[in-house]
Image (spheres, grey):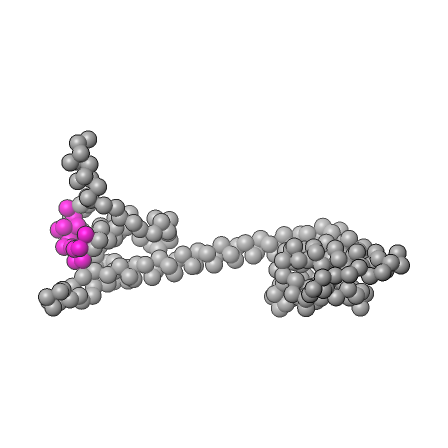
Amino acid sequence: MKKADMLDWLKEGNVTIPAVLLTQYKEMRLNEQELALLLHVFYFSEKGNEFPTPTELAARMTISAFECTDLLRSLIQRGFISISDGNSTDGIRYEKYSLEPLWEKLFDQFMLKRKQEQEMTNQKEETDLYTTFEREFGRPLSPFECESLAMWMDDDHHDPIIIKAALREAVISGKLNFRYIDRILFEWKKNGIKTIEQAKSYGRKFRQHQGALKAGKEEPKVSANPVPFYNWLEQ
């Protein structure tokens, strides 16, 4: 390739679009022709032509100017493109295509997909939580126990991971019952325990304290912001 050709190629520049447009246009009910047309409108706008004619667009596509006109009309009616007024430096008014509606729809679609993925994740975590409890209890949960699990998540807003950690504490302590687990969750929430690491640290210190009491040793000293060491699980 000659240097002059290389320079001309570089002068054409690049067109940067959100990758999510390529992954979500189908869910937005856009077909490939409509997507290509939107990309060409965007390209013309980047090059300073904010209102390309159907003939100019068709010259870069495999469809006719008449088909471009129909596609543009459909995209405008469906809210993917709008036509707005602009003013030149000479004060002359002109019309231009705006792709802001497309970006707004794309953002809404992205957030909807993220919400759906989060709901699926939450549903899976809840299913795993019920399975974990039934495995530890060695039996199906009663309706009351299922309701308790639901209340811990929906009313008390405990993360399923934290609930599993509380279950683990109950297993380690040999007190596998819902009242005991509820007391653990209550104390953790009161003391700001929100992560699995905090829960493990809190439980470890509690068990160390219990072991020290049984051995008749002096209660271990703690640094600033001490964790209240009392038998809160026995209350």
The answer to if 48 sits in the magenta stretch is yes
Q: Quadrant of the N terminus?
A: top left
Measuring from the top left, give residue 30's x and y in whole percent. 31, 53
Tell me which residue sits at (30%, 59%) in the image. 102
Q: Residue furthest right?
A: 216
- Which residue is pictured at 82% across the width and 61% down the height? 219
For the C terminus, the quadrant is: bottom right
Occupied quadrant, residue 110: bottom left
Q: Name the residue: 13% across, 51% down.
A: 55
Q: Is residue 234 left or right of residue 106?
A: right
* Rendered location of residue 46, percent (x, y): 22, 53
Q: Is residue 40 left or right of 202 when viewed as pictured?
A: left
- Residue positioned 18% across, 34% down in the render: 3
Q: How many marks?
A: 0
State the image quarter where residue 84 is shown: bottom left
**Could you tell me if residue 69 is visible in this image?**
no
Q: Name the quadrant containing residue 146.
A: bottom right
Q: Name the residue nearer the viewer: 18 or 106.
A: 18
Q: Which residues are magenta?
A: 47-59
Q: Is residue 159 left or right of residue 106?
A: right
Q: Quick check: 35 above or below 159? A: above
Tell me where residue 58 appears, x and y as whole percent.
16, 48
> 200 or 172, which is in the foreground?
200
Give residue 92's position: percent from left, percent from top. Answer: 10, 67
Magenta region, main secondary structure? loop
Say whether residue 134 is magenta: no
- One can see residue 35 in this view: yes
